[in-house]
């Protein structure tokens, strides 16, 4: 199955209650065989309206970080979220919603086969790296999970709330770039 075929199948998903509030399902976007995959939390208002991940203010900041280390959704990364439909009032996706939706993410992962996964924010880092992941303590460090390097970093929305963390977050994206070069990944 190709990623486009999977997206078509996913578009009609009604496996959890989040389907009721969506305008558009946000499947994911970017290079279809990217070595770098970013995983956020869930669609916000702008994402829900446009059907694309990270297109609001957070997304603009994320794109800036990516561009600063020569990465972009157009060229070399794929971006998705833990859940594909917008949680009401932008609340955190519930564990049970993530447990259902993660099946789509697994299928995306199996097709894309990234070498590095960056968890953007606490929600995906706690689900995919470790349940007690602390962004303030563990951001920017890489751990190997079944041959895939995983790293968690600050969510851009958290940086917009507390700009003091911007420099620390930037260091994480630099560390990602260094890891890419160290592994000889062609981007
Ligand atoms: N925040 C996220 O975690 N994901 C998006 O797609 C947009 C904002
Ligand atoms: Fe399906 Fe995920 Fe949307 Fe729930 S959030 S309806 S599991 S695509």
Image (cartoon, rainbow, N blue to C red):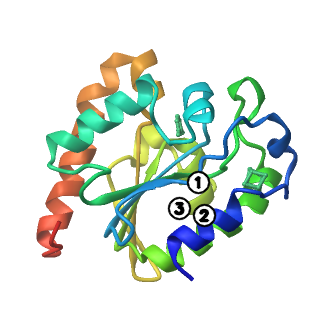
Q: Residues within 10 Å of mark 1 (few under 14, many from 20)?
A: many
Left or right of residue 30: residue 96:
right
The image shows residue 110, relative to residue 161, as above or below, that is below
Question: Quick one: label 3 or label 1, which is nearer the N terminus?
Answer: 1
Tell me whether the residue at label 2 lies in contact with that at label 1, contact meaning CB atoms closer than 8 angstroms.
yes
Query: In the image shown, does 160 or 35 lie closer to the viewer?
Result: 35
On the image, numbered disc 2 is attached to which residue?
Answer: 7
Residue appearing at x 13%, y 75% in the figure: 184
Residue appearing at x 61%, y 42% in the figure: 42
Where does residue 171 sit, x and y in percent of width and height?
21, 41
Nearer the observer: mark 3 or 1; the answer is: 1
Question: Quick one: label 2 or label 3, which is nearer the N terminus?
Answer: 2
Q: Residues within 10 Å of mark 2 (few under 14, many from 20)?
A: some
On the image, numbered disc 3 is attached to which residue?
Answer: 129
Whether residue 112 can be seen here: yes
Label 2 SS: helix
Label 3 SS: loop
Q: Residue 27 carries which label?
A: 1
Whether residue 130 can be seen here: no
- The quarter of the picture where residue 37 lies is bottom left
Residue appearing at x 14%, y 49% in the figure: 70
**CA separation in Å, label 2 and label 1:** 6 Å
**CA separation in Å, label 2 and label 3:** 25 Å
Residue appearing at x 60%, y 63% in the figure: 7
Label 1 SS: loop
Q: Which mark is residue 79?
A: none
Where does residue 145 sit, x and y in percent of width and height?
46, 75
Left or right of residue 14: residue 134:
left
Where does residue 97 sit, x and y in percent of width and height?
79, 51
Question: Quick one: label 2 or label 1, which is nearer the N terminus?
Answer: 2
């Amino acid at each position: 199955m190709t990623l486009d075929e999977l997206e078509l199948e996913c578009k009609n998903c009604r496996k959890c209650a989040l389907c009721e509030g969506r305008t558009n399902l946000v499947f994911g976007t970017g290079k279809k065989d990217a070595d770098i995959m970013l995983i956020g939390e869930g669609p916000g208002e702008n994402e829900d309206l446009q059907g694309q991940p990270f297109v609001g203010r957070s997304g603009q900041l994320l794109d800036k970080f990516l561009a600063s280390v020569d990465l972009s959704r157009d060229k070399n990364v794929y971006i998705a979220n833990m859940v594909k439909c917008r949680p009401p009032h932008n609340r955190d996706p519930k564990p049970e919603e993530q447990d259902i939706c993660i099946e789509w993410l697994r299928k995306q992962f199996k097709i894309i086969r990234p070498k590095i996964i960056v968890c953007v924010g606490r929600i995906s880092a706690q689900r995919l790296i470790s349940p007690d992941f602390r962004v303030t303590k563990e951001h920017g460090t890489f751990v190997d999970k079944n041959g895939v390097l995983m790293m968690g970093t600050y969510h851009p929305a958290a940086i917009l709330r507390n700009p003091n963390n911007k420099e620390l977050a930037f260091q994480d994206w630099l560390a990602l770039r260094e890891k890419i070069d160290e592994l000889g990944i062609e981007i």
